[in-house]
Amino acid sequence: MNRLKAFLRRAAVPALSVVTALLVGAIVIVLTDFEALAKIGSDPARALFWVETVNGKTVISGALGGVVNAYGAMLSGAFGDPGRIITALQTGKERDIATAIRPLTETLVATMPLIFTGLAVAISFRAGMFNIGGGGQLMIGALGATITAIMLAGQVPSPVILIAALTVATLAGGFWGFIPGFLKARTGAHEVITTIMLNYIAALVVFFALRSPTLRAAGSTSPVSKNLSPIVDVPNIINLPNIRLDYGFVVALLMAVAVSWLLFRTTKGFELRASGFNLTAARYAGMSAGGSMMLAMALSGALAGMGGGFMVIGTVGQLTLDLSGSIGFTAIALALLAGLRPSGVVMAALLFGALTNGGKLMGVQSGIPFDLLVFIMALVIMFVAAPGLIRSIWRVKVAKPAPEIAAVTPTGAPTV
Amino acid sequence: MRLELRDISKRFPGVLANDKISISADRGKVLGMLGENGAGKTTLMNILSGLYKPDSGQIFIDGEERVFNDPVGAIQAGVGMVHQHFMLVPVFDVVEAVALGAETVKDAVGTFDRAAARKRIVELSEQYKLDVDPDAKIQSLPVGVRQRVEIIKALYRHSDILVLDEPSAVLTPYETEELYTIIRSLAASGTTVIFITHKLNEVLEVADDIVVLRRGRVAGKADPKTATRQQLANMMVGRDVELIVPKGPAKPGEVVLHLEQVFVRDDRLEMAVNGVDLDVRAGEIVAIAGVQGNGQTELVEAITGLRSADSGSITIGGRHVEKSSPRGVSDLGVAHIPEDRGRDGLINPMTVAENYILDSYHKAPYSKNGVFDLKAVRERAAQGVKDFDIRTPSIDTTAGSLSGGNQQKVVVAREFSVPVQLVIAAQPTRGLDVGSIEYIHRRLVEQRDAGAAILIVSTELDEVLAVGDRIAVMFDGRIVGILTGDDATYENLGLLMGGASFGGGVAA
């Protein structure tokens, strides 16, 4: 019961931030629907909300109707249509089932790399290292996996290639993360600068590598690798046509458990957290500050690299220059939304995965551009960063110190 | 002006901070307000200065009831406040900092009339002997002078009632003496002064009346001419406390800590410790007295492995530790109570339990092969909380939310949770109230009697005199004298701390 209460108290601000951001998004949809709003004087009902049946189909229009359409499309794009899923399951036709559940599985596919990179950010931030280089570490991991797969192709059985590619991806990402950790520990170079620069370097390393005919897709003039799925493919969870969801997602969840265990149940995790909170006190307690920095960055890079590996030999199937896209930065946002907790990272990644995936259908169906989702995600982060605002909007009570604590606050007056 | 507070009550969620407090102070008098941390002093003063509104009760100034809606109202009524933490803009000069928010203007555009402000500041500083250079930058001024600027700032706003909140907390003994002079001259010219503190000597020294608060109520009033430190301390704490923890004579044994010609550089690479020789034996407490900044910090850091000595020999139990890491030193059975518990000794956002294991987390029984045994951690931490009477809602409470005294108890409990041969305690009772000081001193004496060697570094003369078996005075990076027994007096210590050599002492 207490745990539930504690969870609700922690989750209140992030959850309300999401709700608030969606409401603001709705207001933007309404206020930018100029065609509908132009009718506000002559026909307010049509201007705001209008339901009619056209050719046997229910059509909703008006500015408020636009919100319903947009968010409706986003929801079905992210989770599918429940009615359709049930019907498909009843008929039992593989193709129908696949089509019905595809929105949901695609959401999980989009979520997978976000979990890996979100965990990567969480572990480094916990140690006080602001790893902005998740994208670069992911790319280097993906490159490692691609090279391994192509080099080993046809020489060893594909399960061996699978293990080898993922191992190399993890190690390569870890190495890419270790560099800024080492530089910080030994020379004091700020990791924000070095990781950002290493993002550029990573992108260019991938670009150069993809010039090689060994890696590049045959006959392609653009820098994309060969299709890796004939060589090696992470096994799918559900074997249906067009469904990409594979065991990479399960590994991502396992990694969340592992990171949680590492941070809260092991002495290394204790050192990381202690150094992250207060480097001086950690040093006084005999911990090696430099060691924690390097370890945290290497682990962080390894997680991002593993995510990149699972993308190229799993869900995406090939290495492209825009593989990481904005994942590195989204990961920072979602890790903060998650309060740097691994369980929170999973939930936040699911949210962002759903928004990203659902946003595509919204763009197609309702004419509201995908950019609105970027706008909403940015608002979520802003609101999470301003908990006072959320508390005052929603009249959530400010978490009060227990009376025992209040009575012992040094000033004699509890902070108000 | 005469100030009277009548039946002031203020409740915060879960705590009655002020419970029908009535106090009064006459024109030109100094009212000393004494109380432990959490007694409600600051709340009461925040009510007087308009920051908080009382739930009930009245404020009278010269017999007329006043209601303050905000700090501006209080300032207009003549109440000036000098906070514990100064509110001055560091890059401003004194004239700008004082005039800020009460600027005089000389034309319609609103150009600041600096000359007029400067003139008035010079007048005030002469009138009240507040020696301040009006053109100096705030950031270049020592804390004692900054405090004078704060006082000028209040006087500049025509304050007839001046509230000083723990004004001596940041001052050296000499600066504190100067502050007393200033307070007396303010009172002599008709200002009513309210002096808030938890230090007994100060109210006895400077106040005309004393009121003691405890748990939000007036615990009693006292006359400084007749009251004793002991009476005031008992009133503050609500029970009989021992200002000087009783201890038998030391039974010095083997040398545990041996320092020979130790030189240590500070962060600016200047020599902070200039050849210190000192022995601390098992079963004795050696106290290092001295004004802050005479090399004590660097010396402690060199002994505990946090800073490497430039040259010289440091041995603990016969083992050389000049090259040891902090953990290497700690593994020899050395407890270290650091100078600044918030910065060095605790990780405030972590829980009491986590802080309790902060420097032995990697050993049994807390962990095995790098994995925690959470049950053992929780059991031991709970035991530590019990043994050391740490007042915390639970072991899962964050250390930062505890009071200063309880935070220090967490540090002490942790350091004494393993067998120790040497205790290094730097400013172990800084900022703590009487009850906590008594407790910490008692624990240190217990460790001594159990056979540990204890080295205490303190700037508080009361502390070194109360617990030290031998008192070494440090000045300019050197031990300038070691006092024992009858030689250990305030006067001799004061002389040595100021750099005079002392004939009776033996420079060891």
Image (cartoon, rainbow, N blue to C red):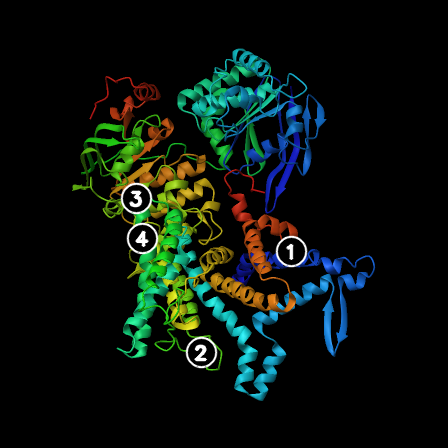
Sequence-wise, which precedes: disc 1 or disc 2? 1
Name the residue tied to disc 4: A179
Name the residue tied to disc 2: A237
x and y percentages locating residue A1 in the rendered image: 54, 64
Q: CA distance from mark 1 to mark 4?
A: 41 Å
Q: Chain of mark 2?
A: A
x and y percentages locating residue B208 in the rendered image: 54, 20
The residue tagged with tag 4: helix, strand or loop? Answer: helix
Sequence-wise, which precedes: disc 1 or disc 4? 1
Name the one closer to the observer, B488 or A227. Answer: A227
Q: Amino acid at mark 3?
A: Thr
Q: Look at 34% across and 76% down and name the residue there.
A: A231
**Is A159 situated above or below B89?**
below
Q: Quadrant of residue A221?
A: bottom left
Sequence-wise, which precedes: disc 4 or disc 3? 4
Q: Quadrant of residue B6?
A: top right
